[in-house]
Image: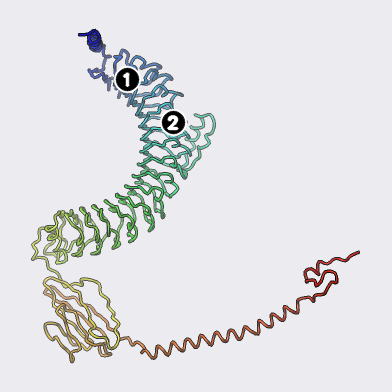
Amino acid sequence: MDCPSRSLIIGCIFFSFVVSVSPCPPRCRCDPNQKVSCTGSNLTTIPSGLPNTTLVLHLDRNGIEIIRQNAFSNIQYLEELSIAQNRLYEIESGAFTGMSNLDKLFLNDNLITGFPSGIFAPLIKLTELNLGGNRFPVIPGNLFGSMPLLGRLFLGSNEVDLFIESQAFGGLVNLAELSLRSSRIKSLSPGTFQGLNNLLILDLSMNIFGTPTRDGAKAISSLKGTQHPNAGLNELGEGIFADLKSLTDLNMSSCTLPTINKELFRGLTSLQHLYLSGNKLDGIVENTFCESPKLVLLELDGNPLENIEVGSFNCLNQLGYLNLNHTRIGRTKGTLFRELHQLVVVSLSHSGLEKIADDSFQNKSRLTRIDLSDNDIEWLNASMFYGTPQIGTLRLQNNQIRRLPENLFADVAGPLNLSLKGNPLVCDCQLDWISGWLLKNGGNLDKCLCDQPSALHGLHLDSIPYDRFHCKPYIVTDIPQIYNATPGDKRFELVCPVGGKPPPTITWTIPSGEKISKNTVHEYENGLYRVRENDSLVIREITSAVQGWFTCEATNILGHKSVDLEVKVVHVPSNWMVAFLVVMIVLFIGCAVCLVVTFLKPCRRRRRRRELIRTPARRVDPRYGPLSPIAEGNETDEL
């Protein structure tokens, strides 16, 4: 074995021996991985005699009040230091001298009120710093300027009103995450986030943006010596985030924001996730989010939204997740979600919805989950989900739904998880298709119970045999009640779209009072009427005799349903009469034009004559020739 190898082995043995015999401070635990834990040991000062090879030091949940100068100078290899949940109120200048290898520092949940200038200067390799849960009223400018590698900074849960000076985060060019959650911030001054070009996540939730209190302004003044120029700033200024070009996540939930507009989000061109839950927004104006066209997630739940404009969600062509729970929308406009073609999940529970526009969710090829629970919805149109095949979850519980149209899921590929509990379901033949559809396409139905008829009250919809779904006759689709016909029309048809179980018998009553049906008389009154196999009534030729009311009556063993239809015979003028009227109108217009021209011609002559009378006579100057009236007026006498 050569000498260098022998020396290396001896050095390793010696190093291991030193580590093994290095003492561990009282009431602390040291492990072979150079980690020292003194958590919950009732310490009041930083322990002495720490092994100089310590890499991780935890001093959480003690009674430490002060960090003295050079307190950690003997453990220069330290990479992680945590002094959280102590009584720390003072950090002396130079407390972190010699800690150039420190990577993570946790000083959260203490009583710190301020920091000496340059306190963080030695921490040139720090990547994570947690100062949350303290009591400092102001963050001065360039406090963190000496930490170019800092990537995560937590300042949340401050216990006094916090004011952030301009350039407070200057120099943090690599900062990726900044948390100011619940820091009692009432205003943000211009330039607060200047220089944070690489910031990805910003948490401003649970603050109260507005004018600082008088006590807060006095505290800032006394701390700085003079009244701070931004002490009276109101709320959030326009373009406050203009420097955050790389920001992808912005959390402004529970900030008591009364309004938002396009200018607030100016510069946030990379924003993907925006949280605005629990504010006081009563409306969203058109094009509000057009500064952030890359938004994928938008949460607006818990706002008293009532005035959402048709263009409120313009420009959000990539939005996939929209949360409007616990709002006051009331009704959705058909164009509200029209441009949101990439929607995957939309939630509208507890929003006071009474009616959903027919095309709200049409042609959404990626939509998989819709939550409409806990509203006052009574009906869904059969075309509601046309062009939306990927729906996997539909929550309709706790509404006022009695029936669902049979073709509601015609374009849904399945499987489908359907929730209908808490609705006053009428379990008749208009709901018998649901179990069969789920059996064929896959999915499941929650434990929804029937409200009517009385014989099925309290039974689970999915457990009722098919042959027990009966219902009285009903109108399947809306039909016009007035028909206009022209004399001479052939094969004029009246349709009576009714359903029922057992299938009802259809009887027509014509204006003369006679009743006909396909089961009784096919031809009536010299072949004028005929009832087809689909129970529609055909009028073979329109004459004045067929004008009047027709009644379609559907009857089965459970009851009957009738609808009245009126046929009006409208007489259209013949072709020669139309031509005559056109000629008369043309002649009238021509005569009117001639009269106007004849009247205007003498007027123009009289006006020309008056102008000639007012024009002064022109005279001739032997030297200059004829003079105009204007030149004549400016003429001067020679001496």
Q: Quadrant of residue 285?
A: bottom left
Q: Nearer the viewer, mark 1 or mark 2?
A: 2
Asked if residue 195 shows in the view, the reply is yes
406 relative to 341 in the view: left or right = left
Residue 148: image quadrant is top left
Q: Residue at x 12, y 85 (%)?
A: 520
Element marked by disc 2 = loop
Q: Position of residue 213 (x, y in %)?
A: 47, 38
Residue tagged 2: 171
Quarter holding the N terminus is top left
Q: Nearer the viewer, residue 246 or 54?
A: 246
For disc 1, the marked residue is 78
Identified by mark 1, the residue type is Leu
Q: Which mark is residue 635?
A: none
Closer to the chain start, of discs 1 and 2, is 1
Question: What kind of colouring is applied to the model shown?
Answer: rainbow
**Residue type pointed to by label 2:** Gly
Question: Which structural element holds mark 1?
Answer: loop
